[in-house]
């Protein structure tokens, strides 16, 4: 059996606007759209409410001097740049979700819950919320230390009075509580969007944060207007990447499946059969491998920043090596990003595939892949196909991850890695496609012609 990758064909852009007009003309869809926009506006309001004791000048200097902070700011939707109550964004919740997703096939209790339908999913979601709170406290304390010293050793402290001793304890607990409450508030707002709005709420929160940074990107490009050729090349690279992201997001391998069942009718037994297919996506991992890779590579630099005091000692020299080698300006950093993204793509895809139990569910429902025996042979066949097509998704994600570095080499623009954020493009396109599919399904339920053919 040969491997083939199918690509959905999209309708022209005018059809998208026509569908948006049709959706606006339906009262309940109009309410969903307005509700989603209202929640996103509230999110942007909270993103500008700072925690107490922030030195904005030192904070701005930190982001100018340390590009690594830009990646952390990505998942907070720009709130980290203001060190607001929403500075942690929904990242602790995403981390908790990933942890439970990885632990589900390992821990029998979680595995049993995952097989109990909607009640089991609600229980796992509740555990995810519980785990989010301590993760938010830990991440918040790490960020406070980051801004109280560490990266800011040369530019000054952005926030003071941090620690668990003496008069600093109450101030620290108050700030951590505010930041954790901000994260849980954003999670609640995201779930409201999922329930009453359009699209996945958590993804929409991240999407709104990324979109809010676009005026800043346009401003950076405007400052480089004298280097017209390089700027045009950067824009062309971004357009090509968006096209590739859409292509791989829709690419899939369809496995043909037949179902056979017996129906008792008129005192006789009849055998009925039907044919369908299982779509296995080339990029089933989405943006998760990039989050894993960048998070791991940021960690050595964060730790090294605490030991780089410029004294020339052995520890300071080692810390300086890590700061130089694991930063966005180092080629070693980007090679490590590519390799880690490829590895994590395989890891996460296999974890998700094993949780789906496709072969077992097929056998229970009387389905089978033509030419493949049900049970273990089907499971082995599907695993071979997943491994084969995941190579395409893994190499693609690795390429997307290092595009900022490649763009900097091609255009020779020193801040190309901060202007062209491939992770941001991947998230924006993915969320836009998912929202488009959901809007299309709502339209089709009301006998409207969709814009995804």
Image: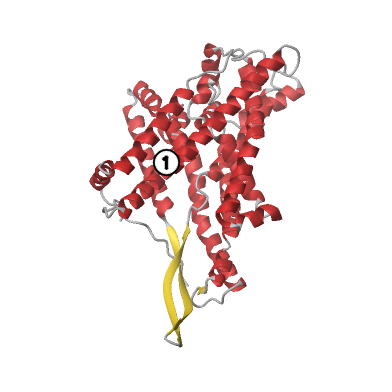
Image point (56%, 35%), residue name = 91
Question: Looking at the image, which is closer to me, 273 or 257?
Answer: 273
Image point (66%, 25%), residue name = 141
Residue 362 percent location from the top left of the image: 53, 69
Colour scheme employed for the rendering of this structure: secondary structure
* Residue 403, visible in the rendered structure: no
Which of the image's four quarters has the C terminus?
bottom left
Residue 276 percent location from the top left of the image: 42, 69
Can you identify the residue that label 1 sits on?
Answer: 196
Crowdedness near tag 1: few (<14), some (14–19) or many (≥20) residues, C-alpha within 10 Å: some
Image point (52%, 56%), residue name = 391
| Residue 75 position (above or below residue 429) | above
In-image side of 42 versus 124 (left or right): left
Question: Looking at the image, which is closer to me, 273 or 118?
Answer: 118
Residue 273 picture quarter:
bottom left
Element type at mark 1: helix
Question: Looking at the image, which is closer to me, 127 or 105?
Answer: 127
Residue 34 picture quarter:
top left
Question: Looking at the image, which is closer to me, 340 or 129?
Answer: 129
In-image side of 195 versus 343 (left or right): left
Residue 80 percent location from the top left of the image: 53, 24
């Amino acid at each position: 059996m040969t491997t083939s990758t199918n690509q959905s064909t999209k309708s022209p852009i005018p059809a998208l606007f026509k569908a948006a007009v049709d959706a606006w003309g339906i009262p309940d869809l109009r309410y969903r759209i307005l509700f989603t926009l209202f929640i996103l506006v509230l999110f942007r309001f909270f993103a500008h409410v700072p925690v107490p004791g922030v030195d904005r000048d030192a904070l701005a200097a930190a982001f100018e001097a340390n590009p690594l902070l830009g990646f952390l700011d990505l998942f907070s939707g720009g709130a980290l740049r203001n060190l607001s109550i929403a500075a942690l964004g929904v990242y602790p919740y995403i981390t908790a979700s990933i942890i439970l997703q990885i632990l589900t096939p390992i821990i029998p209790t979680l595995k049993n819950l995952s097989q109990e339908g909607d009640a089991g999913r609600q229980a796992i979601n509740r555990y995810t919320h519980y785990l989010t709170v301590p993760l938010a406290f830990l991440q918040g304390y790490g960020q406070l230390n980051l801004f109280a010293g560490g990266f800011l050793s040369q530019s000054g402290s952005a926030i003071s009075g941090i620690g668990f001793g003496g008069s600093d304890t109450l101030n620290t607990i108050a700030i951590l509580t505010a930041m954790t409450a901000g994260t849980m508030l954003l999670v609640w707002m995201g779930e409201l969007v999922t329930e009453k709005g359009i699209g996945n709420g958590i993804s929409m929160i991240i999407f709104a944060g990324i979109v809010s940074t676009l005026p800043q990107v346009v401003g950076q490009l405007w400052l480089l207007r004298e280097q017209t050729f390089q700027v045009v090349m950067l824009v062309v690279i971004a357009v090509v990447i968006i096209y590739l992201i859409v292509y791989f997001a829709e690419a899939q391998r369809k496995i043909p499946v037949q179902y056979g069942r017996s129906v008792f009718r008129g005192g006789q037994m009849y055998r009925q059969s039907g044919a369908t297919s299982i779509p296995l996506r080339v990029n089933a991992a989405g943006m998760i491998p990039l989050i894993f890779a960048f998070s791991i590579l940021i960690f050595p630099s964060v730790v090294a920043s605490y030991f780089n005091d410029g004294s020339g000692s052995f520890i300071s020299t080692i810390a300086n090596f890590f700061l130089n080698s694991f930063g966005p300006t180092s080629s070693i950093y980007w090679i490590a990003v590519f390799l880690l993204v490829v590895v994590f793509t395989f890891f996460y895809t296999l974890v998700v595939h094993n949780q789906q139990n496709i072969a077992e569910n097929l056998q229970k429902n009387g389905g089978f892949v033509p030419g493949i025996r049900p049970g273990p042979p089907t499971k082995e066949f599907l695993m071979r196909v997943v491994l084969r097509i995941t190579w395409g998704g893994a190499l693609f994600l690795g390429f997307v991850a290092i595009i900022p570095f490649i763009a900097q080499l091609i255009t020779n623009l020193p801040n190309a890695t901060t202007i062209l954020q491939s992770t941001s493009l991947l998230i924006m396109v993915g969320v836009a496609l998912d929202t488009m599919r959901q809007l299309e399904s709502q339209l089709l339920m009301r006998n409207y012609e969709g814009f995804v053919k």
